[in-house]
Amino acid sequence: MAVTKRAGRKKDATTTQPGSGGKPQVRKAVFESTKKKEVGVSDLTLISKISNEAINDNLKKRFENAEIYTYIGHVLVSVNPFRDLGIYTDTVLDGYRGKNRLEVPPHVFAIAEASYYNMNAYKENQCIIISGESGAGKTEAAKRIMQYIANVSGGSNSSIQEIKNMVLATNPLLESFGNAKTLRNNNSSRFGKYLEIQFNAQGEPVGANINNYLLEKSRVVGQITNERNFHIFYQFTKAASQNYRETFGVQQPQSYLYTSKSKCYDVQGIDDTADFKDTVQAMKVIGLSQGEQDNIFRMLATILWLGNITFAEDDAGNTAIQDQSIVNFVAYLLEVDSAHVNKALTTRIVETSRGGRRGSVYDVPLNPAQATSVRDALSKAIYNNMFDWIVQRVNASLKARGVMAHSIGILDIYGFEIFEKNSFEQLCINYVNEKLQQIFIQLTLKTEQEEYAREQIQWTPIKYFDNKVVCELIEEKRPPGVFAALNDACATAHADPAAADQTFVQRLNVLSSNPNFQPRQGQFVIKHYAGDVSYAVEGMTDKNKDQLLKDLLNLVGQSSNPFVHTLFPNEVDQDNRRRPPTAGDKIKASANDLVSTLMKASPSYIRTIKPNENKSPTEYNSPNVLHQIKYLGLQENVRIRRAGFAYRQTFEKFVERFYLLSPKTSYAGDYTWTGDAKSGVKQILKDTSIPPEEFQMGVTKALIKTPETLFALETMRDRYWHNMAIRIQRAWRNYLRYRIECATRIQRFWRRKTGGLEYIQLRDQGHQVLGGKKERRRYSLVGYRRFMGDYLGIDNRGGPGEMIRNSANISSSDRTLFSCRCELLVSKFGRSSKPEPRILVLTSRNVVIVKQALVGNQVQISAERTIPIGAIKFVSTSALKDDWFAIGAGSPQEPDPLLNCVFKTEFFTHLKQASRGTVNLQIGNEIQYSKKPGKMATIKVVKDPSVRRDDEYKSGTIRTGPGESPSSVSRPTPKGKQIAGKPITSGKLLRPGGPGGQPSKLASRPAAQSRPVPQAMPIPVAAQARPVPQAVPIPAAAQARPVPQPTPVSQPVAAQVRAVLQPVAALNGMGHNRNVSTSSTSSTRAPPPPPPPVAAAPPAEPTYRALYDFVGQTAGELSLRKDEIIVVTQKENNGWWLARRMDHSVSGWAPSAYLEEHAVKPIPPLIHARPMPPPPPTTTTTRTQTNGSAASSQPAAAALRGKPTPPAPLAKRPAGGNPAPPPAPRDSGYANGNRNGDRDEGSGTDRSGAGTPQSQSGGGGGGLAGGLAEALRKRQAAMTQKAEPDGEW
């Protein structure tokens, strides 16, 4: 088949030609996110066992999983689902636009796309042959193909869009006149159709043409029970307009014999009224005028009323019409004389001849049965000719409006039919299907052979059944075939149908020697490709004649209606005695024309299958489907396709599909092969261990022999995506952890940097509002104090704040500036005033005092008083630290409220802002307010040291304690508790090395240069275990950790700072110093002579010895050998430590259970060579101090000498600046945060609590008490010093 050319796909892609040796243009592989898990096999050529039963099982499995499409190579097998699967939407259609067949699941859209693409790419006509039995979905497949082509064919001008609309409109029009409800299908096509869509050179539709075949006109006059006539009769009788009902006498379908004989008027799922509107609309779209539409419906009414003419037998045995009024109405519709109708239906003209000369002419009366046949013949002729005229009229409207370059044909025709009783109609249908099968075999085998020869590969010739002998058996003239024998019988015995049938049987005896033919009693059997079919001889000759009597032709020729003459254009030649062409001649000519048309195009095939007879969406009748599989020849299709190789693909497409499977052709999803596509295919097949006998390399294609090999490649490809998904998930989880940690650090830094800056600015503005005139409460000045405003959440949705807003009737447009609980001084008659709890709310327009009261065990909330901000004249408060103030509202009806609110200063500030500074804040020794309207009163405020906390009100006097100075300001925000960043240490994101084994880009980065580390004076190695007794220079070889000295002394080259772990050194700048008592730092003391040299100090990094062998499972794990010494750079609590080899060659993660600490002990000097301490100087003071120091330090030294050396505490970072970050020993894709244990970079303090700040002194005379005292001083200094601006970074 020509569709195999499509392997190259993208027309505009620049693919490498074979033999060019260039690198192919391979698209990056992507994971098919919409790909569903395949059920069975989507291509039957990949089925393991080739048999009808295996094909049936595969189709059943896919049908039960809503997969109705399956391929046989380029042939599509479609199983009718009898339900809407939602697979024909615009979204699905776009998914097949421009896609290769192998890129998307099987679908009718893929066949349409292949045909349209091949037409444009190869400039060849295309055709799509749809076959299958009634109800299998042929018509639906044809409509979906037209839907797809109309969507993708482009063209924006009105003419092209009009053609598209007309092509789509042919579906409802021809379905109404050519489809009917049968027992097997509610919308069965009762005719064959070949729609040819014509395109210009740009691939835009410019016209179309329709050929129709084998209309089942016998359905017009009779149907079996539960079947219907053609749809148009029911649409017309149910939905005709009132004008048609009056003009044509249209009634309901129950009134007509032709529509009521089967007792079936309605069909589930079909709305005849709505369909009639669609039919009329389609007529308008195609361009039928109103007059043409009226003539069509006039003929429909004529047929319906013809069927109601009934006959009876008179006394002479001749026929008589029972109801003359019906005949008169039929004559009115045909526009002929009613007497002519009577004569044509009841008599027959018989002409005799004698010796070749014309004899006498007689009018022979008919009996009722013969009259009924004549009536039905006229009805069938009118409908058949009208259907042909509609098709011709559609073709006239669809005539090409430009230069036609190419075309796509869609053949929707009867499938092979085998019934219990098969007659002439089945013979014609099966003959056409034999011709189509012959085309399929010829083109398929021809294509296969051409492809194998073109690819220069070895293959075995295919054995198949050539049905050419069956076609010749039916259509040949010499020797005469079935149609020739039938014509001969019709010509020699035309008077009596029974005699003609008997003559036909005699003629068939000549064919008895043909191996594909078997004569039987009253029947004959033909061995078709789909099975043996037995045909009944009875009635065949009469059906083959297919001609109207001259009486009827004369009748319609007398009509005064031009449309009737259009339907019957040929005038009757009374003297012409030449036999007209038979139905067999017509179908043979049509079939040969169809074959010649299809042979000029490149065909595609759709085989449709009906899963059950009940139109059920869940039932799968295996015996019925197996029968269809046999007569559709699916097994033969598979054998032809599988005769050579199950899978074939161009080198470029094969590499594009499977390059992921070879490490030499891909890296991290990218195509890395530099050779040509053919060598890439060989490399992939080699790396996947495909045996050489399972594939062959052609000139342009790789051919895979068995489907199992292809399945193995696809499985490996799916596994690759699975592994990549795991890696992506791991990287994503690590990224999320990294992002969360980064966000936490940024937020922490920003909070520390700003600390709610707007609230702090508002708080500082409060100091200005008071103007230094009012004493302050101590807790009002704490550094954490912020002016938050709406403390009760009045503006929040939900919760108690919203309930207060609604109960107090605060407008939703008012923004709440301040809300807080307070007390209101309430005056009661005959009693002293008493504070009562209230809620104070300040909005952008009002001051609202809200009251809560318990009424009937229920809390009632209401606005006790609302004061507009503009009405407030002043606010009065005292100069002491009390919380009382009065709001001077100046109301003539109500007194001024006197309130007690703990956040008074914040209220004043917000009120000042809301009033734009118009409110006067009065601060004095007394509080003034209107106790009654128009009557001012004063409240005395007295300072009383005995009042500890809250103010006390009694008898117009407020007693309060002493407060902070009026000029006091808020203290700076205290530095928050240091929180160390969480290091990200898990997740093996990157493998070492790059594509092709090249070094990683990360590994080639230059190491970060750390700042110079300040060098400190070294001390002896003994300082590791006891306090340093003297501040003297010691050779660095014996140094434990650097200690700053008061007197700089030059050092020898050997006296260098010991090796320090690089990340620790970079972060800290210098080692942590052991405290030395100030009593041992006398500057008058002479330095003692240096001690003898000792062994080199152990490395600063902890070393560990491997207890067992360990083989790393991934690239991030460090393999170990037993007794190997390694350096541990980072410890985690999950059982894995980050380590590296001593030579810095490899680093990775090692299990902590496999490691044992390896302590390098210094070599002690020989005891006999140890010099005694020199005598002290003669100064008395110095001697006393020295003796005391020595005496006190000797027991401590002796006690400390026996204990193990504690781990060196981490030093603070020098204040001089932040050192550059150290180079990471392991590339994880992320920075690991703090590498210095649990230290906080901002402060340099050890938050683990294990490290105690040590004194900077040199001696140990202070002992533990001196160290603790120094630690307390250090802590106090750290709390009072200003925080570093970049503390978190």
Image: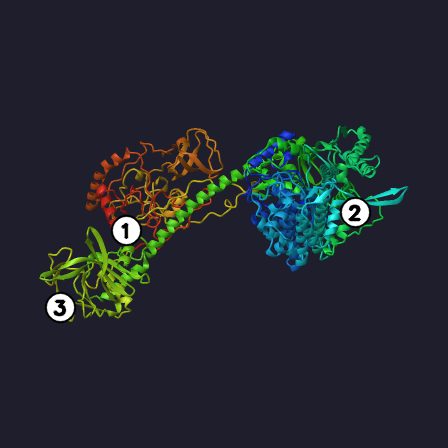
**Residue at 56% over, 48% down:** 91
Marks 1 and 3, the one that precedes in the sequence? 3
Dots 1, 3 in contact, CB < 8 A? no
Q: Where is residue 137 in the image (x, y as percent from the top left)?
A: 62, 41
| Furthest-front residue in this view | 315
Q: In the rendered structure, which disc, 1 or 2, sits on the residue that comes first in sequence? A: 2
Location of mark 2 (residue): 550
Place of residue 99 in the rendered image (x, y in percent of width and height, measured from the top left): 62, 46
Residue closest to the far left: 830
Crowd band around label 3 with a 10 angstrom C-alpha radius: few (<14), some (14–19), many (20+): some
**Dot 2, how many residues are within 10 Å of its Cα: few (below 14), some (14-19), or many (20+)?**
some
Q: In this view, does 1050 lie to the left or right of 319?
A: left
Tag 1: Cα neighbours inside 10 Å, few (<14), some, or many (≥20)?
few
Numbered disc in front, either 1 or 2: 2
Alpha carbon separation for disc pair 3 and 2:
129 Å
- Does residue 148 sit above or below 492 in this rendering? below
Kind of residue indicated by mark 3: Ala
Identify which amino acid the numbered label 1 is placed on: Ala
Which residue shows up at 60% across the image and 55% down it? Answer: 241
Q: Position of residue 1282 (x, y in %)?
A: 29, 55
Residue 991 visible in the picture: no
Q: Distance between the residues labelled 1 and 2?
A: 125 Å
Q: Nearer the viewer, residue 986 or 241?
A: 241
- Residue position for label 1: 1278
Query: Is label 2 in a helix, a strand or a loop?
Result: helix
**Front residue of this view, candidates 1056 and 1102:** 1102
Which of the 4 image quadrants contains residue 1166?
top left
Q: What element carries label 1?
A: helix
From the image, tell me which residue sits under label 3.
937
Q: Which of marks 3 and 2 is in front?
A: 2
Q: Which of marks 1 and 3 is in front?
A: 3
